[in-house]
Image (tube, helix red, strand yellow):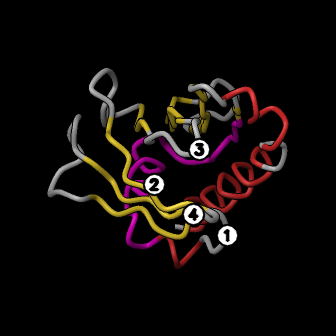
């Protein structure tokens, strides 16, 4: 599992709004996430988002258990080379920064080859941290 976190000096609803504005990502992030595009009009459970990240392109399903709530956005990626990932983004009121947000990004891997992520996924926490930092800069600049 990969788990990253960052404190953002803005309210969770502000962070969530910027995060869900997928079409504006190119304005503030040019690294890991190339594109996230909803494939339907809503971000309801069961709907899909088209994702281009690093060298991977896939359609992920917004999970029925958590879906797109005020504190979480989560999708299940399809199996790629025997590995699939449950990717979670959460927006919780900060216990560190008054009025701020603790933003958490994590991915849990499953599948026959999931153990390989411990070997080949070593650079991914840094990529997640880069996205988190870019999100923080964007939100705090507004």
- Element class at badge 1: loop
Q: Which of the two labelled residues, at mark 2 and mark 4, occupies the earlier sequence position?
A: 2
Residue identified by numbered label 4: 33
Residue at the image point whose x is 37% and y is 53% from the top: 59
Task: Give the label on residue 19, or none.
Answer: 2
Callout 4–callout 1 Cβ contact below 8 Å: yes
Disc 3/disc 4 C-alpha distance (Å): 20 Å
Dividing the picture into quadrants, the one containing residue 85 is top right
Disc 4/disc 1 C-alpha distance (Å): 6 Å
- Element class at badge 2: helix
Q: Is residue 85 left or right of residue 47?
A: right
Residue identified by numbered label 1: 31
Disc 2/disc 4 C-alpha distance (Å): 12 Å
Residue at the image point whose x is 61% and y is 70% from the top: 29
Callout 3–callout 4 Cβ contact below 8 Å: no
Q: Name the front one of labels 3 and 2.
A: 3
- Element class at badge 3: loop
Q: Which of the two labelled residues, at mark 3 and mark 4, occupies the earlier sequence position?
A: 4
The range drawn in magenta is 4-24
**Crowding at mark 3 (Cα within 10 Å: few <14, some 14-19, many 20+):** few
Disc 3/disc 2 C-alpha distance (Å): 28 Å
Residue 64 lies within the magenta run: no
């Amino acid at each position: 599992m990969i788990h990253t976190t960052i404190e953002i000096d803005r309210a969770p609803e502000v962070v969530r709004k910027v995060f869900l504005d997928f079409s504006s990502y190119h304005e503030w992030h040019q690294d890991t996430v190339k594109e996230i595009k909803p494939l339907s009009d809503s971000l309801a459970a069961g709907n899909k988002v088209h994702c281009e990240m690093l060298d991977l392109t896939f359609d992920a399903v917004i999970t029925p258990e958590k879906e797109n709530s005020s504190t979480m956005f989560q999708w299940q990626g399809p199996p790629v080379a025997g590995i699939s990932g449950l990717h979670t983004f959460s927006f919780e009121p900060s216990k560190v920064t008054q009025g701020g947000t603790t933003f958490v990004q994590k991915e849990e891997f499953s599948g026959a080859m999931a153990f390989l992520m411990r070997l080949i996924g070593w650079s991914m926490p840094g990529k997640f941290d880069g996205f988190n930092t870019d999100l923080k800069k964007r939100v705090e600049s507004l």
